């Protein structure tokens, strides 16, 4: 949470001018977003988010991310809509970096998700998956199955610094995932990072999905598995099957899960836990202790992984979705 | 620039509820304000700033600061207006800290102040001084003449770590200021920290003054002297007399400066440079190099002080204001 790139009034006024959104009234750097710099911008025409893309985002991916938001928004998914400037461009340059102006979404992310939130999340995720059909661009999931082993290799020699036994644990699990991963599940555009801080609510009503900067093509059901990890564990890492059931039922009510997808849920959930265990472990070892961005404990995902290994079928997540 | 205190949705919704401002729609931590935590809050009734007061603010001073904003706002000064809750209170508690909700002011602070900004600033400062008359609460200027020596004593033994000769320089200057400081100038409520980042403009039109958390009772002309230091030096520390003239003429057009005030301007400017030299030196020695808040270089004020010592009369600031 930080503002990495400072912008002068004159630069910003010129930038905004190109969009025909009236006069610039104010802008505030907002303390959210780990990867990019975000400003909340008021003009005489409304409220917008200005995102300045920092080094961790590959500029070649920006047309995919911004185009996807436009595609989804046009199909009724409440997500930020990139604004086109007078020339029709959605990607511009500000302060020497790529930048885009997107509509502001009201709402707050749930710090303590409830069952009702999980139900709405499931429905919204399914609507996003359906709306994503027909989006013409493609982006490989760099943090999918193929990416896990290279990432592990980068920190494996130091894995024991995080936790004794972590190296063996990941190594064994990776072998299992690589040999058993389902590769014939329905594919599509997934969000791939739909944690509570990326889903806005006003009360218990879902008001929007944000932060599509990990979106990619992968198995749709894998996106559900990420959400089971991100939304349905209690702070003590007990799995809350009532939340799991709400998430799965909500999803299935909009997009019916196939029997293959239902059967794959435990291994997909193990894979999702592995993905976050790997990136958190890497960041843990490579982020200075005094960095602006707080390090997140990899061990949280060891505990989630242990749970998933104990689950024999989708029923373990609260719901069989039997026909 | 940081968010020090995190607030949960439920807490904030309850807090906002007490103000009768409709439903809470969103809130974003903003990356501004060194001393306190600020959130930009949207409700169905409008946009507000929620300020959570952190440890450096003395809670006993809050009625002065908030009451002053209300007093000035009622007299036509564009500044944030503290909102009273249903019980009539402007100071409440949130997340275990004192907190207030104030109206949001549109506008941007000028990163590179121009002459036109200085003219408007002078007028607005004088209007604030006039409007402040009759404000019943009082607050001693803890960073005024009486406070400088105790502050210096706290870091004098380490002053040479900042710059060779700094200890002697401050010591000599302090003696001069203590023996020659004018004590019969017109008194009133001063802002005491009216740097460019506390003055908002839309284009060249001044839209508001913010951040009254150093306001106190002191010589009104001392507030002008602070502004001469804060607004009229170029990045290379040359004094821009055209800006100085605009500031002084703007002020004098609203509130006529007495001959005593005009005569005192060079020593007041030296005092103002001393005040910021002292606090910056103290902070320089007491802020860890890797702190969230950037340290500001005390040497900037040594250079300003040198200029003021070369000024014989107010004419040296660009304008005699002769009658």
Image: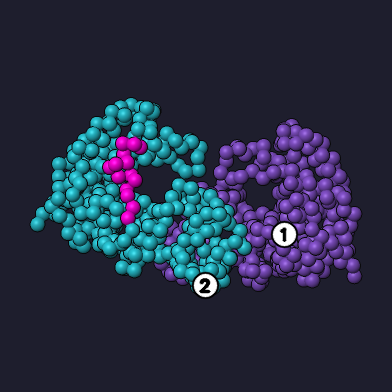
Chain colours: A cyan, B purple
In the image, is A45 to the left or to the right of B185?
left
Determine whether the residue tagged by mark 1 lies in a helix, strand or loop.
strand
Write down the chain letter for disc 1.
Answer: B
Residue B316 coordinates in the image, percent (x, y) = 86, 58
The residue that label 2 is drawn on is: A20
In the image, is B209 to the left or to the right of B222?
left
Q: Residue at 75% across / 47% down in the picture? A: B301
The lab-note entry on whether marks 1 and 2 share a chain reads no
- Quadrant assignment for the C terminus of chain A: bottom left
Residue A2 coordinates in the image, percent (x, y) = 51, 49
A44 or B254, which lies in front? Answer: A44
B40 or B88, which lies in front? Answer: B40
Q: Residue at 37% across / 65% down in the picture? A: A70
**Vertical relation: B211 (above or below) B204:** above
Say if residue A271 shows up in the picture: yes
Range of residues picked out in magenta: A138-151
Residue A107: mark in rendering = none
Q: Residues within 10 Å of mark 2 (few under 14, many from 20)?
A: few
The mark total stands at 2
Q: Residue at 75% across / 39% down in the picture? A: B152
Question: In which image quadrant can residue B107 be found?
Answer: bottom right
Residue B190: mark in rendering = 1
**Vertical relation: A139 (above or below) A81:** above
Residue A7 coordinates in the image, percent (x, y) = 58, 57
Would you say the residues marked 1 and 2 are in contact, meaning their CB atoms lie under 8 Å apart? no
A1 or B135, which lies in front? Answer: A1
Residue A167 coordinates in the image, percent (x, y) = 31, 29
Q: Residue at 26% across / 59% down in the picture? A: A129
**Vertical relation: A268 (above or below) B250:** above
């Amino acid at each position: 949470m930080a503002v990495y790139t400072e912008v002068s009034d004159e630069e910003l006024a010129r930038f905004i001018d190109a969009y025909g959104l009236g006069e610039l009234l104010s802008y505030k750097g907002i303390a959210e977003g780990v990867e990019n710099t975000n400003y909340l911008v008021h003009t005489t025409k409304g409220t917008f988010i200005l995102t300045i893309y920092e080094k961790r985002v590959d500029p070649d991916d920006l047309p995919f991310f911004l185009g996807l938001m436009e595609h989804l928004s046009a199909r009724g998914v409440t997500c930020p809509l990139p604004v086109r400037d007078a020339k029709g461009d959605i990607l511009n340059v500000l302060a020497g970096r790529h930048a885009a102006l997107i509509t502001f979404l009201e709402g707050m992310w749930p710090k303590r998700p409830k069952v009702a939130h999980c139900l709405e999340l499931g429905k919204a995720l399914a609507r996003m998956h359906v709306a994503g059909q027909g989006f013409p661009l493609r982006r490989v999931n760099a943090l999918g199955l193929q990416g896990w082993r290279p990432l592990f290799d980068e920190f494996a020699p130091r894995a024991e610094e995080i936790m004794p036994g972590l190296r063996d644990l990941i190594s064994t699990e990776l072998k299992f995932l690589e040999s058993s991963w389902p590769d014939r599940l329905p594919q599509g555009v997934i969000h791939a990072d739909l944690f509570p801080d990326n889903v806005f609510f006003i009360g218990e009503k879902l008001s929007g999905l944000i932060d599509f900067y990990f979106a990619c093509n992968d198995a749709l059901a894998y996106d559900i598995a990420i959400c089971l990890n991100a939304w349905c564990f209690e702070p003590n890492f007990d799995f809350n099957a009532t939340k799991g059931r709400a998430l799965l039922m909500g999803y299935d009510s909009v997009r019916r899960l196939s029997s293959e997808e239902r059967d794959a849920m435990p291994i997909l959930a193990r894979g999702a836990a592995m993905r976050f265990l790997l990136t958190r472990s890497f960041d843990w070892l490579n982020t200075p202790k005094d960095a602006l961005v707080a390090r997140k404990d990899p061990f949280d995902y060891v505990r989630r992984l242990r749970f998933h290994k104990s689950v024999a079928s989708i029923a373990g997540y609260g719901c069989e979705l039997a026909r």
